[in-house]
């Protein structure tokens, strides 16, 4: 998850001071400023900024506890629902690619299963790279065999160097709303000689800049 935190006395009139932040453990230390007393039945607001990590995730289980005179046992924090949940980070929740035919020169139907940690906009583009070795010629209007769950157009863009580009045609729902992964099947013509399965990666991005998951070198999401 989270990589960094910023802020000083990032509160609304509360007696707390932000002291230390441990990015590896996710532990934030707050100190009571001076001799101030925490009043009963009073809501104190603490705000801080964190830099989300490069990998998607479900929201973590966040707890609050106190030491010293402010001793409290570790108590779960009520998190927001949906995409507003603290530290829910956009990414691929599930990604799995299967095939039907391994024979040399065979007509091979591949099926990609995808689910997401958070909602993605209807302008999302998913790039699948590393589909190398196929004899299928490049096609800017490459027909998909079938879909489960919809979500993408009936055609994709296929480049013979091993790249398939899917474009969403509706909002892509997250796995907490839609537990069944999206499934996209497409047909490729296997190479004339055998090969091991290549390293295949996924990137999802939005031209408007509202999402970019699995993108860039080591941060690309490999397919299991």
Image (cartoon, grey):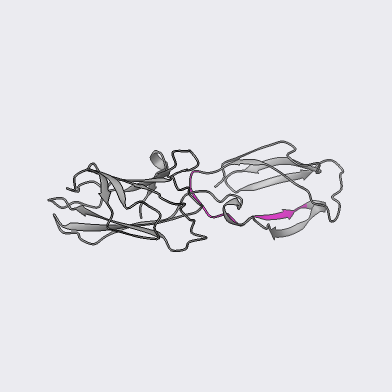
Does 63 lie within the magenta span? yes
Q: Residue at x 84, y 56 (%)?
A: 41
Residue 102 position within the rendered picture, expressed as x and y whole percent measured from the top left: 19, 59
Question: Quadrant location of the C terminus?
Answer: bottom left
Residue at the far bottom: name it: 180
Kindly identify the residue that appears in the image at 61 percent across and 50 percent down. Answer: 86
The mark tally for this picture is 0
Left-right relation of 30 to 206:
right
**Which corner quadrant of the image does residue 220 belong to?**
top left
Residue segment shown in magenta: 54-67
Could you tell me which residue is drawn at 40 percent across and 49 percent down?
A: 168
Q: Position of residue 100 (x, y in %)?
A: 23, 62
Main SS of the magenta part reads loop
In which quadrant of the rendered view does residue 204 lie?
top left
Relative to the observer, which residue lies in front, 156 or 216? 156
Given residues 176 and 39, the one toward you in this image is 176
- Residue 199 location (% of width, % of height): 30, 48
Q: Nearer the viewer, residue 203 or 6?
A: 203
User: Residue 178 in the image: x percent, y percent?
Assistant: 48, 61
Decide which of 101, 2 is in the foreground and name it: 101
Q: Residue at x 72, y 55 (%)?
A: 65
71 falls in the magenta region: no
């Amino acid at each position: 998850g989270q990589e960094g935190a910023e802020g000083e006395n990032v509160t609304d009139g509360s007696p707390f001071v932000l002291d230390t932040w441990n990015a590896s453990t996710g532990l934030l230390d707050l100190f009571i400023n001076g001799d101030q007393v925490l009043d009963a039945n009073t809501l104190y607001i603490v705000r801080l900024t964190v830099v989300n990590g490069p990998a998607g995730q479900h929201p973590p289980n966040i707890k609050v506890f106190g030491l010293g005179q402010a001793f409290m046992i570790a108590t779960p924090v009520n998190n927001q629902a949906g995409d507003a949940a603290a530290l829910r980070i956009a990414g691929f929740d599930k990604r799995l690619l299967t095939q039907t035919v391994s024979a040399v020169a065979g007509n091979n139907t591949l099926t990609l299963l995808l689910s997401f940690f958070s909602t993605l906009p209807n302008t999302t583009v998913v790039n699948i790279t590393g589909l190398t070795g196929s004899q299928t010629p490049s096609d800017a209007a490459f027909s998909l065999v079938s879909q489960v769950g919809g979500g993408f157009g009936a055609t994709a863009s296929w480049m013979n160097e091993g790249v398939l580009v899917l474009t969403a045609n509706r909002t892509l729902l997250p796995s907490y709303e839609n537990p069944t992964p999206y499934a996209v099947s497409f047909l490729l013509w296997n190479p004339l000689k055998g090969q091991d399965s290549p390293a295949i990666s996924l990137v999802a991005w939005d031209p408007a800049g509202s999402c970019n998951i699995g993108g860039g070198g080591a941060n690309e999401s490999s397919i299991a």
